[in-house]
Amino acid sequence: MFAKARPEGVRIVDVQMEFEDFRYRAPYKFGGVAVDRATVLNVRCTVQNKAGKSATGVGSMPLGNVWSFPSRTLTYDQTLGMMRELAAKVREITAKYREYGHPIDINTTLEPEYLKAAGEVPKLAVLVTASPFDAAIHDAFGKLHGVSCYDTYGSAMMGRDSSAYLGKDFAGEYLDRYVLRKPRAAVNLYHSVGGADPLTAADVVKKVGDGLPETLPEWIRYNGLHHIKIKLQGDDLNWDIDRVVGIDRIAQETRPDVAWKYCVDFNERCPNVDYLLGFLRQVKEKTPRGFERIEYIEQPTKRDLKADRTNVMHEAAKLRPVVIDESLTDLESLLMARDLGYTGVALKACKGQSQAMLMAAAGQKYKMFLCVQDLTCPGASLIHSASIASHVPGVSGIEANSRQYLPAANEPWKKKFPGLFVIRDGTLKTSALAGPGLGL
């Protein structure tokens, strides 16, 4: 019997990058910090197979230094500058790599090299910086074969099964077992309410005045919302409780017939799980309806899971799924989070297409709650994020807040993908994301 031929991979022949800078239409407050600008890293990568056929893919991602590289000693410009410098190193490392392989194998090989080059840049920020390069390779690989990249995760195109990346539990399995070859028609949109966002007209200190909604009721009507992500403080229990109660009241009054769903996100600022349990208990007392509408809780405590192994989430997870986000940088962190009681996984395009596919497989294998989260992704990065949400089974919804904070960056994409950038019924229309590569 003949041995199965190893699938033919591609090699990288060219990598280009550029930066774009944008100002937010209004500041977005999370994790105790108000963000008012973004630097987007755009990448173009050309790959070639052994027959000489080539294709070029694109990737894009905001560098998101406030989220991925928080620092008490470095300024915004300093952490951003370090990520920009790292991007140039990542481009050089990627451009010099000449081995043939599948995009996930290429990323698995190059990620340790990116980390070596990172210096003082933390791993999460390295993943964010490298993510558009990884995305561009996946996009190019799919385009070269004339198929969606989600059609390239089976044995026909991958040389190794998933056990090579995820361990013995995945022996004999390929990633195509955990993704949909065709995108879902629509994905629920989670509208984000930042820590400084006005809820009512009385909260508006100064109008933006650009024709877009200024208050939560206006956004609800404008986008036909039914899912809301609520950014909380984590260090002011009464404020956090009142914020949820107030948002639930406004949602109910504005669209009383809607089956509302909420995500509450503390961005790691809860001092411990007792704070979270007290929050949930009091929310349930003050608004039983609002409590029932909480679909999941996102990363309540600090991202360094190894530093506090006693701060477990088992009791909280009995009440609602508790999702790992900032802590999730690899399979080891996912497994550690499971041991500590986390029951959900936040998938993010900003951590790389390769990681998103691997963590999507692990999350499903271990029966964890799945969602797709944002980095205020505009334009091509939002399309990438939406493609993940539409191709991973079981995803509850997608946060997509660039329409709130970076609408100018979305303008060039509206005509080609109106269903992603013009929201009327609280969902992103994702059926168009079936084209070659990432669907861009």
Image (cartoon, helix red, strand yellow):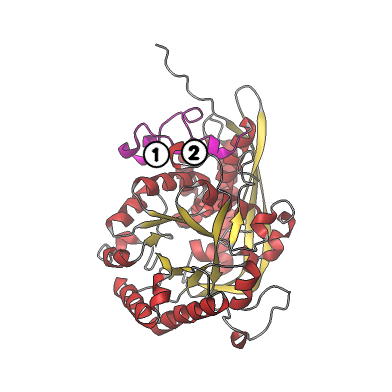
Q: Secondary structure at mark 1?
A: helix
Give the residue type at disc 1: Tyr
- Indicate the quadrant where residue 297 lies: bottom left
Query: Of residues 246 and 97, which is closer to you in this image?
Result: 246
Q: Residues within 10 Å of mark 2 (few under 14, many from 20)?
A: many
Which mark, residue 93? none
Q: Which residue is mark 1?
A: 165
Q: Is residue 204 above or below residue 74?
A: below
| Rendered residue at 62%/52% (across/down) | 383
Q: Which residue is mark 2?
A: 104
Query: Of residues 381 and 320, which is closer to you in this image?
Result: 320
| Residue 111 shown in magenta | no
Q: Secondary structure at mark 2?
A: helix
Residue 247: x percent and y percent?
50, 78
Q: Are marks 1 and 2 in contact (CB under 8 Å)?
A: yes
Q: Predominant secondary structure in magenta?
A: loop
Specify the farthest residue to the bottom: 202
What is the total number of numbered labels drawn onto the structure image? 2
Specify the farthest residue to the front: 257
- Indicate the quadrant where residue 209 lies: bottom right
Residue 395: x percent and y percent?
47, 53
Give the residue type at disc 2: Ile
Magenta-colored span: 147-175
Residue 347: x percent and y percent?
47, 53
Residue 192: x percent and y percent?
54, 69
